[in-house]
Amino acid sequence: MKYIHGFIALVLIIVSNSACQNKNLKLHDDMIRNESEFWNKRSISHVILNQMIGKETQVIWSTTSHTAAPVPLGAVGPEKYTKMLQGPIQNDSLGRVLKSAVKEKLNVIIVIGDGMGNMHMALPIYERYAQKNKIPTYFARIMSEGACGYLYTGTARGLVTGSAASGTAIACGKKTLMNMIGVDSLGMPLQSALALAINGRYKTAIVTDAGITDATPAAFYAHSINRDAEQKIADQLEASSNIDVILGGGASLFFPKGTIFSDFEGVPESLNFESLRTDSRNLIESFQKKDYQFCSTLRQLQNIERGKVIGLFASGGLPAAINRDESTVSIPSVKEMGNKALELISDTDSPYFAMIECARIDWEAHDNDIASVYKAVEEMNQVLKDAYRKYQESPENTLLIFTADHETGGLEVAYRKMPKENAFHKKMEDGEEWENITNPLLYKIFVKNLERQKKSVSSVLGESATLSELKINIREKLGITLSNDEAEQLFYSMTDYKRYKD
């Protein structure tokens, strides 16, 4: 009889697991469909704009979504670990390397360029070559000195991933389904390298220029089958309260429903946005009761010398690098946040673990905005500069890694055939004349295209309420002149334009 009971119990477990898996797979498929509909709806104006300027810039964006393209991976540190990261590997393999390094008590710094593909990373490299600047980027320097590889980013079920699934693979060492964070394909919690570090008495930091509850940072500390359940994710962050330094955006989920952020002590008037919570919980107050110092401006952050810190500097994401001006000086950049975080967690004899996300690369790539992507990647290069200096303080005990969670946009630069009358001509020394009708995109034009743009495409489209405003803004801020017909076509495609996460 006991064998029958055991068999029945086994059958019930199998049926239960199967039902759970089917439920999760249905949720997974629904989420993919909804996300695809969202991006397709909002991409129309960007596609039209790119068609209008593509012949001049020779920039090719194949999509406004993620692609399956492998992403770059570079690392310096103990040879035992850089060997593991050499060449092509899967994203969950990287997660297992992080865990192994933590178990060995190494300092770990991982810098993630959200959405950064190989061409995105190459933009500042090409720019330096074009300007005859022989100082290498830190992408190139790290790859030359240590591991040079690339990451396959697929999910447990498919080729194309999102920040949640790929972030989980990197953070936890196991692939999962789309939009799931910190859980496996059955929804069971996974232990991240960060959690392992906390258990090992590491000093730890999470830094992002997105919201602190966004998918990539959340994958390191939270567990949810739905990345969009950000209020619950914020609650999980507060409940654990064991990360030493937390810096980023997403403040609107940390204070009570019906209140304004700027009403709280120390918060500037410029941050006068409402809470997005559905309850009366004040997570900022809860953090302060647990000995966290709270800051909401760059100066406040710079004045902190030691101890636990939570810094929230925007409702959603922080300003794009290309949009920074005198109006944003009180908001720290990801470079400034990353540098301060590394300073705070490396001031003791304890090992440290830092995850720094440069999220704006992905946001600008979703907008097919090459100049803004270039600025965001250059900002990541500056983050790596500070991280590399920290690595140099103890290279035998520190593992520094940079990579991306996925590629966004299918970015490429292509040659263009020209009419014969526009061909390039050059007289050779032997008197023969060289003729070429293939335009490779001259270096000087490439640099000009990057430098002429003063604001992000998203801000220009978002600020253009009328047709005349659109034409003026595109000319003055993007450096592009549209015909009346082109401007009208673009303007009327913008009816449903909405900037994601701003």
Image (tube, rainbow, N blue to C red):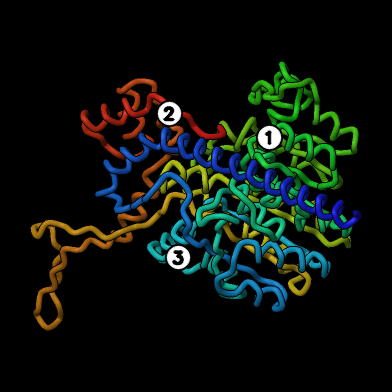
Q: Secondary structure at mark 2?
A: loop
Indicate the quadrant containing the N terminus: top left, top right, bottom left or bottom right. bottom right
Give the mark nearest the N terminus, 1 or 3: 3
Q: CA distance from mark 1 to mark 3?
A: 43 Å
Q: Between marks 3 and 2, how big is the CA–CA gap?
A: 39 Å
Q: Which residue is mark 1?
A: 230
Q: Nearer the viewer, residue 169 or 372?
A: 169
Q: Residue furthest bottom?
A: 430
Which residue is rendered at x = 40% and y = 62% of the image?
131
Observer-nearest of 460 and 86: 86
> Which kind of residue does numbered mark 3 sit on?
Asn
The foreground one among 31 and 266 is: 31
Circle 2: is it few (<14), some (14-19), or many (20+) Cα within 10 Å?
some
Number of the front mark, 1 or 3: 1
Q: Which of the 4 image quadrants contains residue 95?
A: bottom right
The percent position of residue 365, horizontal first and vertical second, equals 46, 46
Element marked by disc 1: helix
Q: What residue is shown at x 76% (from left), y 64% (from top)?
A: 99
Residue lying at 68% horizontally and 35% vertically, measured from the top left: 230
Q: Residue under circle 3?
A: 133
